[in-house]
Amino acid sequence: MASLEKTIPGSGKTLSNEAYHRRNAWRRRATLLLLASPALAWFLAFMLWPLGNMFYISTTKWGSINGVKQFIFLNNFSRMLHDPKIAIALQNTGTQIVAEILIIIPCAFMLGFFLSLRMRGYRILRTIYFSPAMISVAALAMIFLGMYRPDGMINTLLNSVGLSSLAFPWLGNKSTALAALTAIDVWGGIGFNSVLFFAALSNLPEELYEAAMLDGAGYWTIMWRIAFPLMLDFVAVVTTLQFLYVLSGAAQNVILLTGGGPGTATFTIGYYLYDQAFLSGRLGYSQAIGVLIFFTGIVVILLIRRLSSRFSY
Amino acid sequence: MTGLTRFIQKIRRGSPAFAFGGYSFAVLYALVIIIPLYFVLISAFKNNTQIISTPLAFPPAFNFAKFIQAQASVHLFHAALISAIITVGAEALTLILAFPAAYAVARIRSRLAAFVESIFYLGFLIPGLAILMPIYMMVAKSGLLYNPIALILIYPAFNLSLSIILLSSFMRKLPHELEESAVMDGGNILQIIFYIFVPICMPGIITVLVLNFINIWNEYLFALILMDSDNRTIQLALALLRANQRTVDFGLIAAGVVFSMIPVYIVFILFQEKIMSGMLMGAVKE
């Protein structure tokens, strides 16, 4: 496209080099915007505009779609400070986030390292590990319902091996319900992230391992002391993704399986938003929770970036 | 490969403990994944007594009664048809929007390109839950509530970011002579995109189509609030299999789950490498 002629085709006019390039730059900009504008418009209409609306609605008191909106400025947020359910929801979500990250990342890293050695069978293992990523939240919830329910697979197996004392209504008991929902995420999360680590580890220069071997390092040491520190940027990415997922996406498991119960055992911040917006008719307050979720996400993304750039190579 | 190859050989010969430990852990986790999938697959062909008393036993006969019952209960085929219509519409729209935008950010040399691209990166930061209610309002106001067209219009917005990033990274690897020769032949930019870039980018387009298919077919939350029982998608039908019954009829649910997963697993088997590389790239670019 960038031919160096200074004659404008068709007009016969000649321009100075600088003017020609300036003119060309403007033309490129116009073409770029023209081609990108349908996608930008879509993005604006269905992502940024709703996001802006979330902020706007969060400053109102609003009961239902057809009801009257009343501007109350930051009252929803000050109410939030004294709302015990917010504290419970944040605690549940926090527990879930910490548990998922602490279990998924070490397991996924070790499996990813093992896959990256490309020992016999690594391809089939990789396919198996990745396959849960194909399952929808609804299907996944239904599969685990069949395992967790009182006469479900897990309890039948426990009974058949004589451990009936461990058999439990996993989703119906306050002490196990949140752990049961967390386990659903961990189940597939380890696999997906192990394939992620596998791909990243496969890009490491091989001399690193070689040098370590010459120093007489064992494989366990190589895995944790050499490969893992080199993966810190990646650990940051995986942590961020998992964090964002639990903050927002994990609410679907609650909607599908427990409705926040029993009691408030699985009442998470994402589910609180859904509950206020679609079940309790507090639209303004629900969007205030949305604002909280949005900013928590942004702050944590920045924090993790900051930490990872400080510690990584 | 020498370093790594030698490293691997050494593990195989020299450190049976590490290889054994690694395999044990890897196979154990593989079983943890396979058992629930196996459980749901066989449960679809059993009756409820068999499911409860011998959950992991292979079905004595392939009994399709639960599939028939599920079809009668929530109209699985109709739901699959609705999902298919939404998927095709949203896929086409996503591609029409994403392809020119990807071309623009990848092939036009301008500082504006980086800025436009960064706007699309914002898509990864916006949680679906946050915009759920505003989108519901918007759809309700426009009179498209319970209409599949609403989802056809909305799903492209969710899939644009990843589609544009994948397509533009594909286009960046192509040589710049492509456009230059076309310009000399007097082609305008739309012709260049349509006649030169679309055919060359087919592998990238297929990756994008496959990933968007999985996302759209599997989407639950927005379908839940925007559709009703006449226009339920396959994912809503699944959840209804539980809600419609007074007690949990797991055989019925399993039949629905298996039915809903068939198209996705066919695509997974056919395009495994593309799906993995595409999803990994999406994760890393975040």
Image (cartoon, coloured by chain):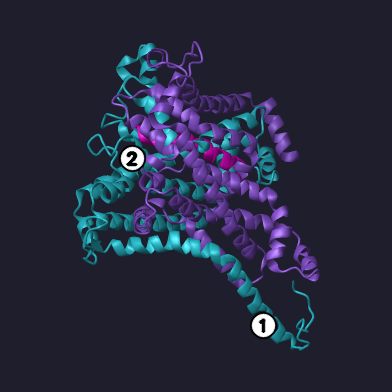
Chain colours: A cyan, B purple
Q: Given contact means CB atoms under 8 Å apart, are the residues at marks 1 and 2 in contact? A: no
| Residue behind mark 2 | A255
- Point out the tag, 1 or 2, that comes first from the N-terminus: 1
Residue B105 appears at what percent x and percent y?
62, 64
What is the CA distance from the residue labelled 1 to the residue labelled 2? 56 Å
Residue at the image point whose x is 37% and y is 52% from the top: B132
Q: Chain of mark 1?
A: A
Is residue A110 among the parts visible in the rendering?
yes
Residue B224 against residue B110 in the figure, above or below: above
Q: Chain of mark 2?
A: A
Residue at the image point whose x is 33% and y is 40% from the top: A255
| Residue behind mark 1 | A22
Q: Residues within 10 Å of mark 1 (few under 14, many from 20)?
A: few
What numbered label is drawn on residue A92? none
- Residue range (magenta): A180-201
The rendered magenta stretch, by its main secondary structure, is classed as helix
Residue at the image point whose x is 64% and y is 32% from the top: A123
Residue at the image point whose x is 51% and y is 34% from the top: A132
Query: Which residue is more in the foreground, B25 or B68?
Result: B68
Quadrant containing the N terminus of chain B is top right
Is residue A105 among the parts visible in the rendering?
no
Left or right relative to B185: residue A243: left
Q: What amino acid type should be assigned to the residue bearing mark 2?
A: Ile
Query: Which residue is more in the foreground, A287 or A297?
Result: A287
Mark 1 residue element: helix
Residue B149 appears at what percent x and percent y?
46, 51
